[in-house]
Image (cartoon, rainbow, N blue to C red):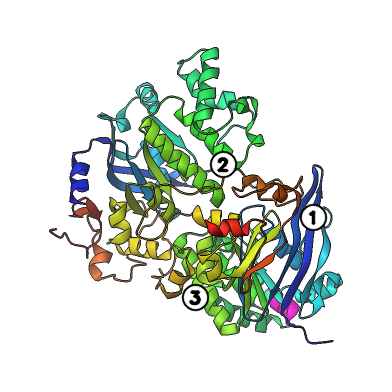
Amino acid sequence: MTSPEHLLEIQHLTTRFHTEDGIVHAVNDVSYTLDEGDTLGIVGESGCGKSVHALSIMRLIQIPPGEIAAGEVRFRGQDLLKLNDDDMRKVRGAEIAMIFQDPMTSLNPVKTVGFQVMEALMLHEGMDKARARERTIELLDLVGIPEAAQRVDDYPHQFSGGMRQRVMIAMGLSCNPSILIADEPTTALDVTIQAQIIDLVKRLQQKFGMTVIWITHDLGVIAGLARRVNVMYAGRIIETGPVKDIYASPHHPYTVGLLGSLPSHGSRVSSRLFSIPGEPPDLIGLSPGCAFAPRCQYQTPRCWKETPPLEEVGVGHIAACWEKDAVRRV
Amino acid sequence: MAEALKTDSTKQALLHVENLKKYFPIKRGVFQQHVGDVKAVDGVSFDVYQGETLGLVGESGCGKTTTGRTIIRIYEPTSGHVIFKGRDLATLRSNEMRELRRSMQMIFQDPYASLNPRMSVLKIVGEPLEVFHVANKEERRERVANLLQLVGLDPDFMVRYPHEFSGGQRQRIGLARSLALNPELIICDEPISALDVSIQAQVVNLLEDLQEELGLTYIFIAHDLSMVRHISNRVAVMYLGKIVELTDRETLYANPLHPYTQALLSAIPVPDPTIEETRQRILLEGDLPSPAHPPKGCRFNTRCAHVQDICRQEEPAFIEVASNHFCACHFVTPTTT
C-alpha cells in the first residue's frame, strides 16, 4: 500500500434518506481533506448536513432509510465505506471518535459513568477490569472532573451538563483516537461552561496531537478554535478555506450574510442587523442550480439552472458561486 | 453621555419591580412536608422605562425566566412588589389582573411548543380578541390579517396550522398574537434561542421595527449576550436568583464591574479569528451551585477569583456605584464621577 497523502480524504460523499415524503438529499457531493494535527471547523444552520456528514464518516447512518449513495471516505488511505462491519467497529472509537451535542441523552442513565468509559477500554484495548478502571480514573482526572476516584462510580444524573460533556470527552479520548469529531458539543451548555470545554479540548489536542473536526452553528466558537473552516448549505460545502480568510473576506453570499447577521462585537453597535431573507430550503425537492439562489441578492438566471463548482478564490480558499466577483465588489 | 443619564433619571418608569421573590417549595415524603425552597428569584429590584428595552441575562438556572413569569403573574410571587402604571400587580385580584394583562404580554422561547397545534393561525392570533370580547367575528378576521401583515406574514396564512410553518414563522405568529390587544410591555423570553442564525437576525429586526412603530417596551430575556447588547438599552445580569449588575449597555460592555459580569463577557466567543488569537479569557471554575442551597454571603463566592473572607460571610448590597450603574460586590465601591 502506498503511503497516503492525507490523514482523512473525503471524496464526493453523498448521503440520502428515503422517506415517505420523498428522498432527502442530506449530504451532496462533499469532498475535503484533513491532515494530521489539523482543526477543521464545519459551520452551517440546522439541516445543512453537517451532522449527517459526520455520521456518514463514522458509518452510523441507519440503513435503511439512510443510504450512503456515493463517495469515498479514505482514512490513512483505506476507504471506510468498503470495510465490513467488524473492521469498521475497530476504527470507530479507536481511530475516529465522536462526541455528541446532547450530554444529557448520550450517556446511559442506568450504568455508572465509570463503566461507560471502561467499556471502550476493555473492548478496544483489551484491558482487564482493574486496569481499565485505573485508566478511567486517569482519564476523568485529565478532563477535569474533581475527585475522579470517587465520582467514577456515580451515575450520569449526578453530574451537571458540563461535567457530562467532560465524561463524553473522556470516553472519546479513551483509546487515543487520531481524529475526534465533536458534533456541537457545547451547544447545550452555558457560555461560561462552553469556554471551559473549548479550553479543555484545545489543551488535550496540544497534548496528544489529535486531529479535530468541530461541528457547530456558532461562528464565534469556530473563530477561536479552527484553522480551516467548511461552510455548508443544503448538504454542500459552499465555501472552504483558512479561518482568517473566510472571516476577513468571505466570497459566498451565504457566508457574507451569515457573518453580517451577527451583532457587531466591536465598540460600535450598529443600528440594524443584516438579515438573509427567506428560509433554508427543503432538502426533499432540491431544484437544480445553486440551493442558495432563492435567498440570494446576487442571483442571475444561470444560478437557477447550473450548480456552481467550487473554485479557488485565494490560497486554499475555495467558494462555489457564479457571481463571486459581483459579491467581492460590494 | 452625562446628558443621556440625566434624561434617564427623569424618564418615567413603566414598571417598577421591588424586592421580588419567588420560591418554589421542595416537598418530601407521604405528607408532602415542606423541607426547603428553591430560591429561583431572591429579591430583585429594577425599573423599566417607557419605550426602552431592558435586557435580562444570565446562565440557565439564574432565575431570569422565573423573573419574567412572576412579573406577569404566571407564577404567584412569594413576596415583593411589581408596580405597573402605578398599580401593584402582586396584590391584585385575578379579575383586575386579567384586565391589566391586556397591556402586558409575553412571547416564549420554544416556537414549537408555544402554539396549539390544533388551532389555525386565525384562531391562535384572534383568541385574545375573542377572550376580551373586543371584536366580532368579521372584525377579528380583519384584525388578524392586519396583525399578520405587521409581523411580515402573508394574511392568507390564517387558515393554516402551526406545523406548516418554520421556527422563524412560528415565532412571528406568537408575536402577532401577543400584539393583538395593543400591549405596552412585552416580555420576550429567549425569543430567538431556538432559531437559526440567519433567522435570528430577521426576528430581532422585526422586534426593533415594531418597537419603533408601536412604542413598545420590552424586557428581553436571553443568554446570548451579544444579541442582548444589540437590542437592549440597559442590561441586568442575574446570578442565582439575584441581579448582580445593572447599567446601560455601553457601560456594561465597556466597563463591567462585577467579577461575574466580567467572566460572562469574556466567555462569549468573538466571531473574529484575529481577536480570538490574542484574547485572554477569564475561565470560571466549576458549575453553578444549586439554587436550593445557595452559598452563604455573596452567591458568587464559590467561583469568584477575587474571593475574600467577607464574601463568604456577608451578602453584598446592590448599590448605585456610579450614576445609573448598580452592582452587588463588596469590592466595588461607589465612585464620585
Magenta stretch: dominant secondary structure: helix
Q: How many angstroms separate mark 2 from mark 1 (CA)?
A: 26 Å
From the viewer's perspective, is residue B172 above or below residue A30? above
> Which residue matches tag 1?
A16
The answer to whether residue B77 of the structure is visible from this angle is yes
- Residue B300 appearing in the image: no
Q: Is residue A124 rendered magenta in the image?
A: yes
**Magenta residues, start to end:** A119-125
Indicate the quadrant containing the N terminus of chain A: top left, top right, bottom left or bottom right. Answer: bottom right
Q: Which residue is mark 3?
A: A147
Lateral position of residue B218 relative to residue A308, left or right:
left
Q: Given the image, on which type of amino acid does mark 2 rest?
A: Gly
Instruction: Indicate the chain on which mark 2 is placed.
Output: B
Tell me the CA gap for discs 1 and 3: 45 Å
Q: Is residue A308 left or right of residue A317?
A: right
- Name the spot of residue A279 as percent of width and height, x first: 62, 44
Which residue has dot 2 on it? B168
Q: CA distance from mark 3 to mark 2?
A: 44 Å
Name the amino acid, label 3.
Glu
| B189 is higher (above) or lower (below) than B178 | below
Residue A209 image position (x, y, % from top left): 60, 83
Is A190 rendered above or below residue A72?
above
Q: Secondary structure at mark 2?
A: helix
Q: Secondary structure at mark 1?
A: strand
